[in-house]
Image (cartoon, grey):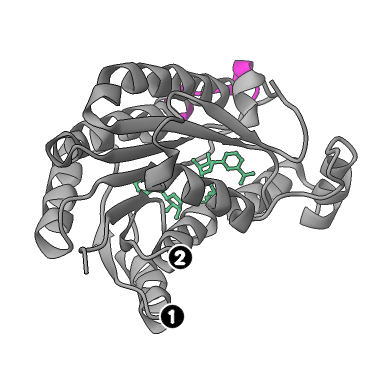
Amino acid sequence: MTSPRIALVTGAARGIGAAVAERLAADGLAVAVADLDERACAEVAARIASAGGRALAVPIDVSDESSVARGVAHVAERLGPPTVLVNNAGVLRDNLLFRMTNDDWSTVMDVHLRGSFLMSRAAQGHMTKAGFGRIVNLSSTSALGNRGQANYAAAKAGLQGFTKTLAIELGKFGVTTNAIAPGFIATDMTRTTAERMGVSFEELVEHGVKDIPAGRVGTPADIAAVASFLAREDAGFVNGQVIYVAGGPKD
Ligand code: NAD
């Protein structure tokens, strides 16, 4: 039997990241569940183990270079060299431009853009050495512009350029890089948005669904299914793409 591929999913303690980690484990990969909160990671890792999968909880702050170096080395030592990386960790600091602070701007850039850069740079050596790799970055429909999200929209659009550039640089080593751009997905992140807007989550969903041709909001499993496809060995000719998973056309 060949040994399983090793995946590392950031922001995997909850929401989309947890669903991706559980889906990749169900696909037969060993999965490093990485997040700021080690205890929450351990819960996801335990769920994977009880479903018969192999997982390791690992604390990583993706915006911190030494934490990234430590975390990736720990995964390589305990599970094996990570050749599938899902850059999913994310935060919101929404505000209209005139109210947006320097901190709102930098925090979002540090987690989404710097975080994906640090993680990809730290993991790519394992991938090129193996002659196989899959990097999946989480963009968003907000990359096309969204009120109150100048920071987040810029970061998510930046991730699309980052994705295409890694695809060009790493393609010849058997490493693909693609982005998933979700629309409205029901998670703690969108619950926070409802709170900020002073509406209930149900009201936000009801309002959001009006613009979604599929007639419903998305679930973390909708995103995990696409990540699962992009991580497959036979998806090796899909490279540098941004796949909108939004219940309708967006780009
Ligand atoms: P979430 O807020 O539920 O989960 C995000 C996770 O990232 C949390 O567990 C958090 O602890 C972790 N995280 C934050 N900062 C981190 C850091 N510095 N290092 C490591 N982990 C960190 O969010 P979600 O809705 O599951 O979103 C996941 C990704 O999908 C994000 O990149 C988000 O921008 C993107 N996305 C979400 C939606 C949506 O509608 N929910 C839409 C488009 C894109």
Q: How many neighbours does mark 1 have within 10 angstroms: few (below 14), some (14-19), or many (20 or more)?
A: few
Q: Is residue 251 visible?
A: yes
Give the residue pinned by disc 1. Answer: 51
Viewport quadrant of the N terminus: bottom left
- The residue under label 2 is 22
Q: Amino acid at mark 2?
A: Glu
- Residue type, mark 1 in image: Ala
Q: Relative to 200, say whether 28 is above or below.
A: below
Q: What's the magenta bit mostly, secondary-structure-wise? A: helix
Residue 27's x, y, as percent? 43, 63
Q: Say left or right for 134 vs 188.
A: left
User: Image height check: is 214 above or below 164?
Assistant: below
> What range is drawn magenta here?
96-104
Q: Position of residue 226 (x, y in %)?
A: 55, 46
Question: Front-most of 95 and 39?
Answer: 39
What is the x, y in percent for residue 247?
76, 40
Query: Is 17 in the magenta?
Result: no
- Left or right of residue 236, residue 249 in this image: right
Residue at horizontal 50%, vertical 47%?
229
Question: Which residue appears at 58% of the width and 48% of the height?
Answer: 223
Secondary element at tag 1: loop
Q: Position of residue 144 (x, y in %)?
A: 65, 19
The quarter of the picture where the C terminus appears is top right
Q: Are marks 1 and 2 in contact (CB under 8 Å)?
A: yes
